[in-house]
Amino acid sequence: MRVGDYACIDLDREARTGVPEVVLAEGKTLPQLVGIARAMVGKKGRAIVTRASPEALDALSRLPFSKRKHPDAGMMVLWAPGFKAGRTGGTVGVLSAGTSDYRVAEEARLIAEELGCRVVVAHDVGVAGVHRLVEALGRMRRSKVDVYVACAGREGALPTLLAGMVDVPVIGVPVSTGYGIAGRGRSALYAMLQSCSPLVVVNIDAGFVAGAVAARIAHGRRGR
């Protein structure tokens, strides 16, 4: 579906892939972003917006729809009256190594929830104080988590450690926190790719990708 002369919305993506088209706010003008979000809610009943600035969130907030706003994650979900997202029964565990990784972990959480999963979250449980991870994992095991998303900057050790402790898939998300010789997420990315524990790694700061893939894994596990 065309929106003005600047966008062509893929209305059938969810039916094809199980993941709806999600609106990346970065690089769009406010009128373009608002126009796309309004059109998506009108046609599909929901618009999910990621990587939105405070100004973009403010502009979207003025639309006459129900909303879920998460400024820290730069996200907003808008719904038409009566829209209800289906629930799959799948459960995703989302962990952040440090508070600096919170925004990416929350992006993954919101996406997995919007794709029908229950999400169990544990923030600031990195390897610098590994005893924190033990308590979090106990809670997540009791919740019967189907897949984990582990977000970490600096040296990115959390996903590797986690993948050696659990019996379900782990998705590592390198985060662009950290500084020095290979900062801005590069050290974390390299470390996760070199992991001796089997895990899947997405791109730097790719919370949306991790959340969407985790939801699909959780759906598949519960469908067995």
Image (tube, rainbow, N blue to C red):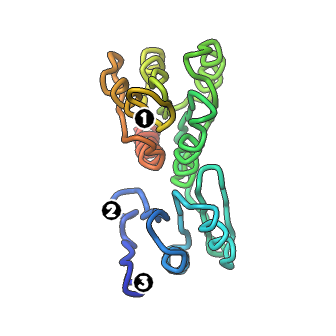
Query: Residue 8 in the image: x percent, y percent?
Result: 36, 78
Which residue is at 66% across, 55% downward?
A: 71
Query: Badge 1: how crowded within 10 Å, few (<14), some, or many (20+)?
Result: many
Residue that label 2 marks: 16
In this orientation, which residue lies closer to the viewer: 118 or 212? 212
- Residue 198 quadrant: top left
Three-letter residue code for mark 3: Val
Residue 219 visible from this viewpoint: no
Of discs 2 and 3, which sits in the foreground? Answer: 3
Query: Residue 126 in the image: x percent, y percent?
Result: 57, 22
Three-letter residue code for mark 1: Gly
Up/down of 88 relative to 125, above or below: below
Residue that label 1 marks: 185
- Residue 3 — which label? 3
Query: Badge 2: how crowded within 10 Å, few (<14), some, or many (20+)?
Result: few
What's the CA distance linking mark 1 and mark 3?
A: 35 Å
